Image (cartoon, rainbow, N blue to C red):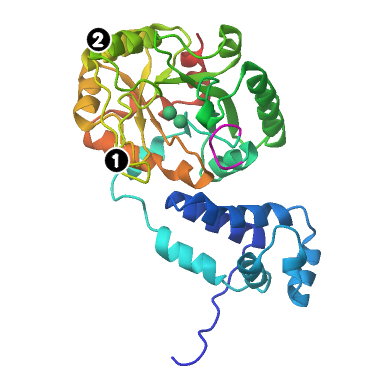
Amino acid sequence: MSGQRPAEPYDGTPVAALRRIAFLLERGRADSYKVKAFRRAASAILPLPPEEVAAAAAAGTLTDLPGIGASTAKVIAAAVAGEMPERLAAAEAEYGAPLTAGGAHLRSLLRGDLHSHSDWSDGGSPIEEMAMTALELGHEYLVLTDHSPRLKVARGLSAERLARQLDVVDAVNDHLAGSGFTLLKGIEVDILEDGGLDQSPAMLERLEVRVASVHSKLAMDPAAMTRRMVAAVRNPFTNVLGHCTGRLVTGNRGTRAESRFDARAVFEACAEEGVAVEINSRPERRDPPTRLLELARDVGCLFSIDSDAHAPGQLDFPVLGCERAEAAGIESERIVNTWRKSRLLDWARP
Ligand SMILES: [Zn+2]
Ligand SMILES: [Zn+2]
């Protein structure tokens, strides 16, 4: 073949092309500044009538629209013309492959995800975009778990902001009524140094699923850390123990050692209280480490396999946790997000 490569056909909308590029970049953990232009352009043209977008593409005036730059205009123009946008083809080639070889069977049994963040705390996308992507991934439910007040670096939500967020969750669910998908009300609540939870009991009561995690004083004395974690696990509001060791194994935040604690004591408390030990699927966390995953398995714990997504594309991470759970021989029945929503909610009620 010589000369210009014939354009491959594309039968999606410009919005779908832009969102797919963003999804793939996020899934590949590209820097969020690279992703933002595509998300911004998608939301800029979403409300416009398709004829108006097509007319601007034909006239070469797409970049006059607010939120559209040169590279996103090229994507839109190609999609409008029914041609595969080059940027989309490149993103598919670079990031579209399966994240991992294993875990597919268990992933097919997951009905939802218990840990995700929006731009209300340290996530990069609005609540409705997270919900829409979870729906598209086939989830029955996604728990929105933005951070609690004490985590100021992550813009943790005060009780007042959380109350306002719950109204937004209601509105998103009204909008998605009939889709079979539900956005559930949740929190990733900080475990304070004394083992208390960083949100008022009245607000915790209003939520449907609560993930409790240690984010501060990760290197505290092991005996104190054990008391701290056991106290949090014994708290009737706690449903999931998030990324229990706090370790970082790779990535641009560098590495961080595991917190030290009596893991058997903590997991026995989890098993007694029916608290799920989170298998955090983020590639830089891979928490718990394998020896602790196997200990929690032997102690009889429940598990949840979570994305801890901070961007819509990262909602695809759970297959990574599934691969680890399969390798550890953990039965799907013990993984709470293989359960139907009604059973999950019964379990999570304090
Ligand atoms: Zn966390
Ligand atoms: Zn998180």
Residue under the point 31% across and 7% down: 227
**Residue 209, position in %: x, y?**
51, 20
Residue under the point 44% across and 13% down: 238
Left/right of residue 78 with respect to residue 217 in the rendered view: right
Quick one: 283 or 272, which is closer to the camera?
Answer: 283
**Residue 152, position in %: x, y?**
53, 26
**Residue 137, position in %: x, y?**
51, 44
Asked whether the viewer can see residue 13, the reply is: no
Quick one: 123 or 302, which is closer to the camera?
Answer: 123
Magenta region: which residues? 120-125
Q: Is residue 220 above or below residue 121?
A: above
The residue under label 1 is 323
Q: Is mark 2 within 8 Å of ligand 1?
A: no
What is the number of the mark on residue 223?
Answer: 2
Quick one: 67 or 74, which is closer to the camera?
Answer: 67
Magenta stretch encompasses residue 122: yes
